[in-house]
Image: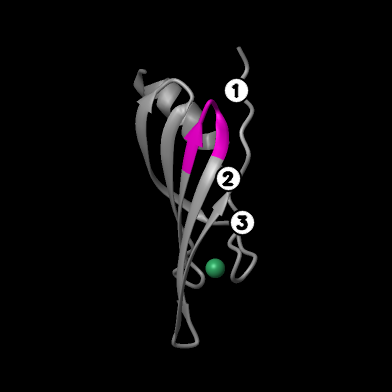
Amino acid sequence: MNYYEFQALKHKQKKICKECGKEMLLDDIDYRFKGCFDNYFICENCQTSCIEEIRFNQSYKEHWHSENNNVAKDYVIKHKIEIKK
Ligand SMILES: [Zn+2]
């Protein structure tokens, strides 16, 4: 994947913060191969973070971490993915 393809991919990744509802900043993408990568999101408003695992071009798991109001929360949201053959 070249630089421009990477930027285009980055541009498509969006996530709304589950804690405060603001759009999160995509800090980085850990790219493995086509359709398989991890998105690293951070909320600039409340510092919540989300690591999203993309498999088969679909959101597979979201690892959320927040520490708002002195309460640390960690949870994983798992989505069902369809494997097209
Ligand atoms: Zn937030």
Judge whether 36 appears above or below 52 on screen: above
Q: Is residue 78 left or right of residue 40?
A: right
Image quarter of the C terminus: top right
Give above or below for 22 relative to 66. Answer: above
Asked if labels 1 and 2 touch by Cβ distance under 8 angstroms, the answer is no
51 over 85 or under it: above or below: below
Q: Determine whether the residue tagged by mark 3 lies in a helix, strand or loop.
A: loop
Work out which residue is located at the far top of the displayed protein and give it.
Answer: 85
In the picture, the disc for residue 14 is 2
* Quarter of the rendering containing residue 74: bottom left
Residue at (42, 22) in percent of width and height: 4
N-terminal of the pair, mark 1 or mark 3, is 3
Distance from label 2 to label 1 (Cα)?
22 Å
Residue plotted at (61% across, 64% down) = 18
Query: Main SS of the magenta segment?
Result: strand
Residue stretch in magenta: 53-59
Locate residue 36: give its quadrant: top left
Q: Is residue 29 left or right of residue 79?
A: left
- Marks counted in the figure total 3
Q: Which residue is mark 1?
A: 83
